[in-house]
Amino acid sequence: MSGPAALPLLTHDGERHTRATETVTALDGRPAAVLSLSPDLLTAQSLRALARTAPLPAAERARRLRAAARHFLHDELGGLTFGRYRACVARVSGHNAPLTDQLTRAVADAVAEAPDRADRARPTGSLPSWRQVPAAGSGVWTRRGETVAAVLSGNTPTIHGGWLQALALGYRVAVRPSRREPFTAHRVVAALRAAGFRPADAVFLPTAHAGVPGLLRRADLALLYGGDDLVAAYAGSPTVKVAGPGRAKTLVTGGPASPATLGAVADSVTALSGTACVNTTAVLVEDDHARFARDLAALLRARAAGRQTTDRHLGPRVTAPAADALLAYLSRHAAHARAEIPLQEIATPHPDGGVVLGPAVFTVPTQDDPLLGTELPFPCVWIAPWSRAAGTAPLRDSLVVNAITDDLALVDALLDEPTVKNVHLDTPTVHGAGHLPHEDYAGTFLMRNKAVVTKGGTG
């Protein structure tokens, strides 16, 4: 690997290097990139330019997005080939090599398919353009504004799907990337420009934390990714859509779990390095939850065996201080829980630097234990008992619930529970696809319907 990559700003008037920079450090402690940071004045100028720019026609946007996906996969962009870009992502994200390849290639799909994915939110009674409205009139799907700010986290490269759909809908977008993994955002914006999008269609504006409020204030709408603090700060805002912790759960009813069920739960815990909001972090079991925990722990240990010091490690690779902090947290807060895998086994030094975390399995005594709401950035799962009398109460506030059950009334209750955002039936919580909503469809937040009646309508 050569020296650190240079990641300049991609502004409304082109590429800019700034005096204010930040070094992106790889997990081995070496610098991976030098990231230019946008001063507030330049951020303001870029947002004004985006607001003044009329959107490209929808068909042209779709054509250029398909071309951008090809550029993303095949071109040298910002001095990085796709192979070197992928290596940079692996060095800073902590995902293993096969998963990094899968996720970075999935970004190209998100670029190419953005128009189709965005259109899935459009109601069947609404048309995409007023020019298609018949004399009797129709609803027309229209933007709620002109500009979107996307403030991203670094969990996974595929986090870019939402703002790409905004671009497909005609918004101009200011992307504030994760400063831990800015490579994907830079490459996507560079690919868009290579495909013919104008500089004022999408900009790459890394900022310090202090720059985020100004970015949110200046954009019409914002897509924001973060923790509970951000969810609390912006929960009441009609112009900010916050994606926070997932607290995804699996419910297993009936008798002893089958090997297939244990395997599916193991997948839900460890897929995506166990760092995504859709990873199962709590399992509620109607039968013998302690036995389920022991069996799951045995399966996860077998899956991790021999892998943790290779490029196929099961959990994420993190820095040694981050690993120490997480282990200290578990020692303090999980003292009453039973560790089915000893704590000293869940942190493995990696020969390329850093520490591989997980898997970890704990049992807790009750279905209302506070630890069931704890989400940590590695494969860590809490197993609790569940009773029919409890119903859906222990499953509230979940991004996804996978219900492994034959109780159809229980499924109805989960779908009716407002704080459960997605329901899977005997399907891992990590299952996703471009046509499925995540925290609702992005278009539900970005768009609205207006009645349009042409001359001669009967009204």
Image (spheres, rainbow, N blue to C red):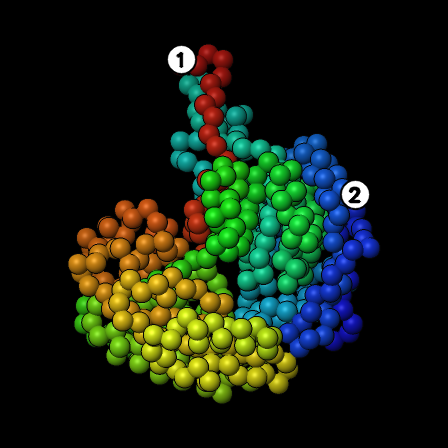
Q: Is residue 251 visible from the viewing direction of this image?
A: no
Q: Is residue 405 left or right of residue 436?
A: left
- Which of discs 1 and 2 lies nearer the camera? The answer is 2
Q: Quadrant of residue 298?
A: bottom left
On the image, the x and y values in percent for residue 299 come to 36, 81
Quarter of the image with the C terminus is: top left
* Residue hosting label 2: 13
Q: Is residue 66 visible from the viewing direction of this image?
A: yes
- Judge the density around disc 2: few (<14), some (14-19), many (≥20) Cα neighbours within 10 Å: few
Q: Is residue 44 left or right of residue 260?
A: right
| Tag 1: amino acid | Thr
Q: Quadrant of residue 174?
A: top right
Q: Quick one: SS at disc 1?
A: loop
- Residue, x 59% and y 75% (percent of image)? 321
| Tag 2: amino acid | Asp
Q: Quadrant of residue 310?
A: bottom right
Pointers 1 and 2 in contact (CB under 8 A)? Answer: no
- Residue, x 79% and y 50% (percent of image)? 15
On the image, the x and y values in percent for residue 126 come to 44, 31
Q: Is residue 400 above or below residue 454?
A: below
Q: Quick one: SS at disc 2?
A: loop
- Residue, x 64% and y 62% (percent of image)? 181
Nearest the viewer among 286 and 448 is: 286
Find residue 458 and name its label.
1
Q: Is residue 56 above or below residue 337?
A: above
On the image, the x and y values in percent for residue 156 come to 55, 62
- Residue, x 47% and y 44% (percent of image)? 235
Q: Is residue 193 above or below residue 345?
A: above
In the image as oriented, which residue stretches furthest toward the bottom?
Answer: 306
Q: Earlier in the sequence, mark 1 or mark 2?
A: 2
Quarter of the image with the N terminus is: bottom right
